[in-house]
Amino acid sequence: MNMAFEGIGINRKELYIANVVKCRPPNNRNPEADEVEACLNYLRNQVMLVKPKIIVLLGSVALKNILGNEYGITAARGKWIEKKGIWYMPTWHPAALLRDDNKKIEFWKDLKEVKNRMEQMY
């Protein structure tokens, strides 16, 4: 992930990377609701401390658990969503790029949008 951001000119020092859950569920499966719930307050505290202006949501698990189940990654991907003064950019999870080469172009475009927004804000 760091290489993708660096590839478009975003310095690693400008990033803070966090996960919805703090430990990976068995067999690399998506986290269950109780696993997310156990970690969500920790993530909320991280966001309060870091005070990001932009959050990139990598994949459906991040999107649904941060912004709500009414969002789907296919429809929301690449579209800015603003809530409570934070701009969110949903995009494909890096694992999805390994399964489908066509998503790499969309992912790259989304990261370029993030870079452009960062340049406008800072």
Image (cartoon, rainbow, N blue to C red):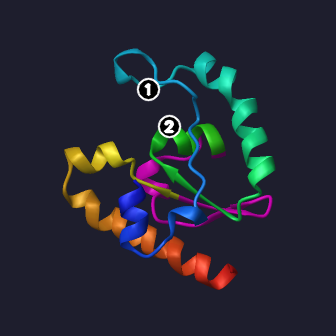
Residue 6 painted magenta: no
- Regarding residue 68, the answer to whether it shows in the image is no
Q: Residue at x 54, y 42 (%)?
A: 62
Three-letter code for the amino acid on which mark 2 is drawn: Val
Q: Residue at x 31, y 43 (%)?
A: 95
Residue carrying label 1: 30
The number of discs equals 2
Q: In this picture, is 88 found above or below 64? A: below
Q: In this picture, is 64 found above or below 52? A: above
Residue carrying label 2: 61
Three-letter code for the amino acid on which mark 1 is drawn: Asn
Q: Quick one: quadrant of the C terminus?
A: bottom right
As helix, strand or loop, the secondary structure at mark 1 comes to: loop
- Regarding residue 74, the answer to whether it shows in the image is yes
- x, y (%) of residue 92? 39, 52
The reply to whether discs 1 and 2 touch (Cβ–Cβ < 8 Å) is: yes
Report the Cα–Cα distance between label 1 and label 2.
Answer: 7 Å
- Mark positioned earlier in the residue sequence (1 or 2): 1
Q: In this picture, is 77 found above or below 26? A: below
Q: Which residues are magenta?
A: 67-89
Q: Residue at x 21, y 60 (%)?
A: 102
